[in-house]
Amino acid sequence: MSISVCVYCASSESVSAELRALAAELGHALAAQGWSLVYGGGNVGLMGEVARAALAAGAHVTGVIPHRLADREIALEDVTELVRTETMRERKGLMDDRSDAFVVLPGGIGTLEELVEILTLKQLGYHDRAIVVLDAGGYWDPFLAQLDRMVEMGLADASLPGLLDATHDVAGTIAAIRGYRPRRGSPDDADQIETIEAPRS
């Protein structure tokens, strides 16, 4: 059964060739699983790479982008579905609503904000879906260390670091999503959980 995976990532055109290749590999891998992609709708940076690769491999791709950013991030008009919003908050809400799991590639302050928000919502019990940080080259190591520091200083519950998985390659990311088991008392419905866990033939 198919699930929709939200990918948060950089829109910067200054990213390295290695990160571009990683994003394209992820897009292709999502399609190979029969999964759909939900992303920020742009045609530039890692956004463009993951979306174009997923489309080329046959995935259903939904882009969500505010009108104000459609020109700056150059909306990818070739996606299966392009949703234009009025605000960034509306954009994030729609991406959240349409997704069964989340993958975070390297990115700037916007990607960091998306990661922190979806992690906060999970900590507060608003969802219990997989959050996977694809920690290529240790990019997210300082963030992961900061989570541990919050716990050490009594500023966050000890469960916080365990609310996400950190992987180092695409294969590990796919495995983390497939192997994810929501906690008991998850707010997500049983059909969604079953969809995430169901093995593919």
Image (tube, rainbow, N blue to C red):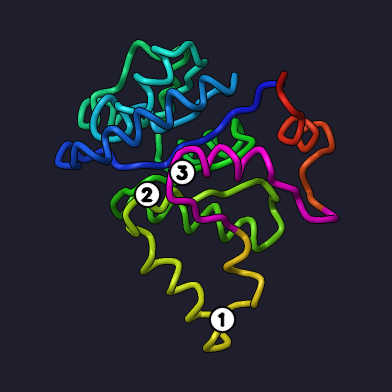
Q: Is residue 92 magenta?
A: no
Q: Is residue 23 above or below residue 33?
A: below
Query: Residue at coordinates 40% horizontally, 55% vertically from top-left?
Result: 113
Label 1 to label 2: alpha-carbon separation:
23 Å
Identify the element where label 2 is drawn: helix
Q: Nearer the viewer, residue 185 or 103?
A: 103
Q: Residue at left 54%, top 52%?
A: 118
Q: x and y percent of residue 168 in the render?
A: 43, 50
| The one of 22 and 94 positioned closer to us in this rendering | 22
Sequence-first disc among 2 and 3: 3
Which residue has dot 3 on it? 89
Q: Which residues are magenta?
A: 164-185
The residue beneath circle 1 is 151
The part of the image, by quadrant, that contains residue 140 is bottom left
Query: For the residue marked with disc 1, what is the amino acid?
Result: Val
Vertical relation: 40 (above or below) 118: above
Q: Which mark is residue 111?
A: 2
Decide which of tag 1 and tag 2 comes sooner along the chain.
Answer: 2
Secondary structure under the numbered disc 1 in the rendered image: helix
Q: Nearer the viewer, residue 71 or 7?
A: 7
In the figure, residue 124 lies in which quadrant? Answer: bottom right
